[in-house]
Image: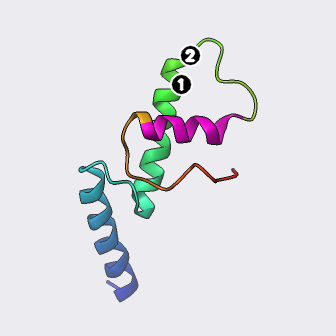
Amino acid sequence: VSPNFQNRANKLKVDISKVSQKDFTGSFGQRVSFWYIGSHIFLDNIILGTGINNETTNMYLYQKSLNLHTIDFSNSQL
């Protein structure tokens, strides 16, 4: 097994342990946070959706309401 693969596997282990504590700051955690927040947005707005061009605002609001430690969506432009 190459050192690069070992390094990435170790980072993944750290990210997974962070996710179990609702800390989504790692690379894997950010991907999980998009799915987690997105599923909540979808289930809360299943019939009419959230409108056009509200993705960043909704991600930020749901991140705060779910009390998640992740990347900062407040100034992001997706």
Asked whether the viewer can see residue 36, the reply is no
63 to 1, vertically: above or below? above
Spatial separation of the CA atoms under disc 2 and disc 1: 5 Å
* Residue drawn at the location 47% of the way across and 52% of the way down: 31
* Residue drawn at the location 56% of the way across and 50% of the way down: 73
Residue 46, numbered label: 2
User: What secondary structure predominates along the stretch shown in magenta?
Assistant: helix
Q: How are the colours assigned in the image?
A: rainbow
Residue 42, numbered label: 1
Is residue 41 part of the magenta span, yes or no? Answer: no
Asked whether the viewer can see residue 47, the reply is yes
Stretch in magenta: 54-64
The kind of secondary structure element at disc 2 is loop
Quadrant assignment for the N terminus: bottom left
Residue 1, numbered label: none
Q: Is residue 72 left or right of residue 36?
A: right
* Residue drawn at the location 45% of the way across and 63% of the way down: 27
Is residue 61 part of the magenta span, yes or no? Answer: yes
